Amino acid sequence: MPAPSLLAVFAHPDDESLSAGGVLARHASAGARTAVVTATWAEDTPRAAELAEALRVLGAGEPRMLGYADSRVPGSAPGRPRLCDAPLDQAVGELVAHLRAFRPDIVVTHDAYGGLTGHEDHVHTHRVALLAVHAAGLERLYPDVGEPWRPSALYLATHPHSAVRAWGGHLAPTGKAMRTVPDELVTAAVDVTPWLERKVAAVLAHRTEVERGAVPGLIAALPPPERERLLGTEYYIRHDPVAQVPPQTELRS
């Protein structure tokens, strides 16, 4: 059975490598089509070039960028609104166009917290992605951006409470709160250690973030065993676009 195609939707360059680099590399290695849509930063910026290198390492094709401004870096997309300020319908429609063009079996995006750090762009990208996945399959929504397509599954990249033991010692000194979910909500815990070398190389390709001491910089400073402890498992919550249940004649809990 061929590996399912996968489209990852994340807020910033580097989110794709940190949150889903392992599954992207895993699916690409199995011959599946993979791609990444990035919500922020302009195509002619250094971070876009770093993203292109990371995607090359992961086998995920060329960058697909919505081109909105990072909410904390106004110069990330000159002349464009911040992602969180853009009309919601506009952002959803742009993502629907990518979904219908790529036609993935699986979509991966941020969880409702926006991951461990809860960055506002991550949270908003989660909202846009959920709306776009549902809209993409309805022919009367955004009829001008391609034929309808309904992905089979949507997975939200997350971290369970138990992951605090791994990440706590590294993020605690930064003062960042860690937003994790109860372990029982995690649908898939994917062992990506066979693809960890590629995942780490993709993370480190984001040199701007390494140099400024963001999470890729933290990863760069760690010995290999600690990198494996932090990045060797990726966690996801499955969120089905259409519930897989028999037809009903009443609402049931």
Image (cartoon, rainbow, N blue to C red):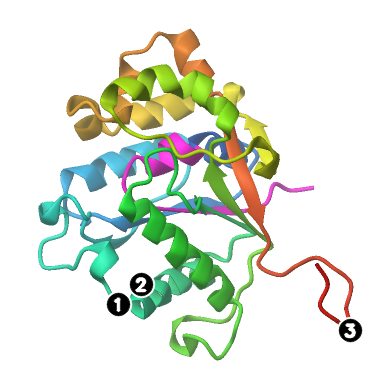
Label 2 sits on residue: 91
Residue type at numbered disc 1? Pro
Looking at the image, tell me whether mark 3 or mark 2 is earlier in sequence order.
2
Q: Considering only vertical position in the picture, is 189 above or below 174?
A: below
Residue 204 image offset from top left, x and y in percent: 32, 27
Amino acid type at image mark 3 = Thr
Which residue bears the numbered disc 3? 249
Residue 150 lies in the magenta stretch: no
Mark seen at residue 174: none
Q: Pointer 1: what residue?
A: 87
Give 217 or 29, whichever is nearer the viewer.
217
**SS at circle 1:** loop
Part of the protein shown in magenta: 1-20
Q: Amino acid at mark 2?
A: Ala
Answer yes or no: is residue 233 visible.
Answer: no
Q: How many marks?
A: 3
Identify the residue shown where x is 64% and y is 71%: 150
